[in-house]
Image (tube, helix red, strand yellow):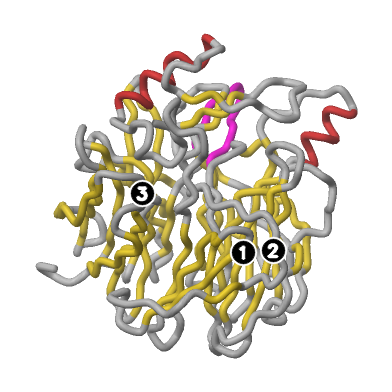
């Protein structure tokens, strides 16, 4: 079931409440019922329940490089480990540690390690390093310029080093090879509290490297009043910019989504409201969106919300400044979905859902730009699982799904009849 982090004015470290009966605030009641209706359950959703004293740490990032090698990054004790596969996930190499010196690593699904690759064989890794104070952290970055054989010592991406929340990092590389890192940041919350002024949510910042990760320029603010604990979708656009999609807090407390185009020069276009479900709740659902931009510039999105009291994962497309073709996924219990646009016509969406016995992995495929869809059942597990992650290589989509029982699994999608 979903963890809901309530937002409390003046409280710097919000206490997590599990939506399974640990309710201490009446404002969360409707969201609790919605989360329960989704079919999530303790032990299968990575945020646990009363039966799980420790949050699941299966969070894994993945990316293909230019040669079709599949890279995965995940937590291994106090290290980030990488493995690679040259046969589309049928087998993986031995693990290699990215950070030689041990340090705390977050890997709780929405805050998992990330991996991206550059045009000349570079391998880039980011992760959140939790700090001693609750809900605080630094965004860490490491790079390899020799195809993953060695990694340089990690650096902290952001210039701000206050002991506050810099968390939920997102990583992407644009067509020119520039590295973008975005994160959720609470420096503006702290500043508002010092002035005794209200501040809803957190803020979204980013930094850019134009020298293959040797140095970063930032910290560039995208927007104030983001939601606090939902992942950011970061994806390149055909015109050479980077698109960010995140859950935002629209006045007075609607947890819809916003998007903005980010420039490598630190200039972000003014944000635009991207979804209009008007889900009003003073809490963060730990359920971020997915986004992918087609060659024609259409932004294809997938997101979780509560519409008319019903928990729903929707997909839609953003074009010409408007949300179009919004529809719910074919599974009413869908959660933690991801999306990829292979071209202007071929799209894939994946998600997981609990059917009362198993957590199921499912997909929807479209070959006409999202006008019609076909649904596929891919796999299931009776134990804990990570969120599924969509990747693309050579015109085909692949799903990485890590489960506690079955390990790292890769499923190929994207072909007619496949």
The C terminus lies in quadrant: bottom left
Residue 118 in the image: x percent, y percent?
55, 81
Q: Earlier in the sequence, mark 1 or mark 2?
A: 1
User: Residue farthest to the top?
Assistant: 26
Q: Which residue, given by chain and number where applicable, does mark 2 sit on?
A: 102
Q: Do tag 1 and tag 2 residues touch (Cβ < 8 Å)?
A: yes
As for residue 248 lying within the magenta part, the answer is yes
Question: What crowding class fits label 1: few (fewer than 14 Cα within 10 Å), some (14-19), or many (20 or more)?
Answer: some
- Disc 3 and disc 1: Cα gap in Å? 20 Å
Give the main secondary structure of the magenta stretch: loop
Q: Do tag 3 and tag 1 residues touch (Cβ < 8 Å)?
A: no
- Disc 1 and disc 2: Cα gap in Å? 6 Å
- Mark number, residue 79: 1
Residue 28 in the image: x percent, y percent?
50, 17
Q: Residue drawn 33% across and 39% down?
A: 313
Q: Residue drawn 39% across and 31% down?
A: 1
Region in magenta: 247-256
Q: Earlier in the sequence, mark 2 or mark 3?
A: 2
In this picture, residue 257 sits left or right of residue 386: right
């Amino acid at each position: 079931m979903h963890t809901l982090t309530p937002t409390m004015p003046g409280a710097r470290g919000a206490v997590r409440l599990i939506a399974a009966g640990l309710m201490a605030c009446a404002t969360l009641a409707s969201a609790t019922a919605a989360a329960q209706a989704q079919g999530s359950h303790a032990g299968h959703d990575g945020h646990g329940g009363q039966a799980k004293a420790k949050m699941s740490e299966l969070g894994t990032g993945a990316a293909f490089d230019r040669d079709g090698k599949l890279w995965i990054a995940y937590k291994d004790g106090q290290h980030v480990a990488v493995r690679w596969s040259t046969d589309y996930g049928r087998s993986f190499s031995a693990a290699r540690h990215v950070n030689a010196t041990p340090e705390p690593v977050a890997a709780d699904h929405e805050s998992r390690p990330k991996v991206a690759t550059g045009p000349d064989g570079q391998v880039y890794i980011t992760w959140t390093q939790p700090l001693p104070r609750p809900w605080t952290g630094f965004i860490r970055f490491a790079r390899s310029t020799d195809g993953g054989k060695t990694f340089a010592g990690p650096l902290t991406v952001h210039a701000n080093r206050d002991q506050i929340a810099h968390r939920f990092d997102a990583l992407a590389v644009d067509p020119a090879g520039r590295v973008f890192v975005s994160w959720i940041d609470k420096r503006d919350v702290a500043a508002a509290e010092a002035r005794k002024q209200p501040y809803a949510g957190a803020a979204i910042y980013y930094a850019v490297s134009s020298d293959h990760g040797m140095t970063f320029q930032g910290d560039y603010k995208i927007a104030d009043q983001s939601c606090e604990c939902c992942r950011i979708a970061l994806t390149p656009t055909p015109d050479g910019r980077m698109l960010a999609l995140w859950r935002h807090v629209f006045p007075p407390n609607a947890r819809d989504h916003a998007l903005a185009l980010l420039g490598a020069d630190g200039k972000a276009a003014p944000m635009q409201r991207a979804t209009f479900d008007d889900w009003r709740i003073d809490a963060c659902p730990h359920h971020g969106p997915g986004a992918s931009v087609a060659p024609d510039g259409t932004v294809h999105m997938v997101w979780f919300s509560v519409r008319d009291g019903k928990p729903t994962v929707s997909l839609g497309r953003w074009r010409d400044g408007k949300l179009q073709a919004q529809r719910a996924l074919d599974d009413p219990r869908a959660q933690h979905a991801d999306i990829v646009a292979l071209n202007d016509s071929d799209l894939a969406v994946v998600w997981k859902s609990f059917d009362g016995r198993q957590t199921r992995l499912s997909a929807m495929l479209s070959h006409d730009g999202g006008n019609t869809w076909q649904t596929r059942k891919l796999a299931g597990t009776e134990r804990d699982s990570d969120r599924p992650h969509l990747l693309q290589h050579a015109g085909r989509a692949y799903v990485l799904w890590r489960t506690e029982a079955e390990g790292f699994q890769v499923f190929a999608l994207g072909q007619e009849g496949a």
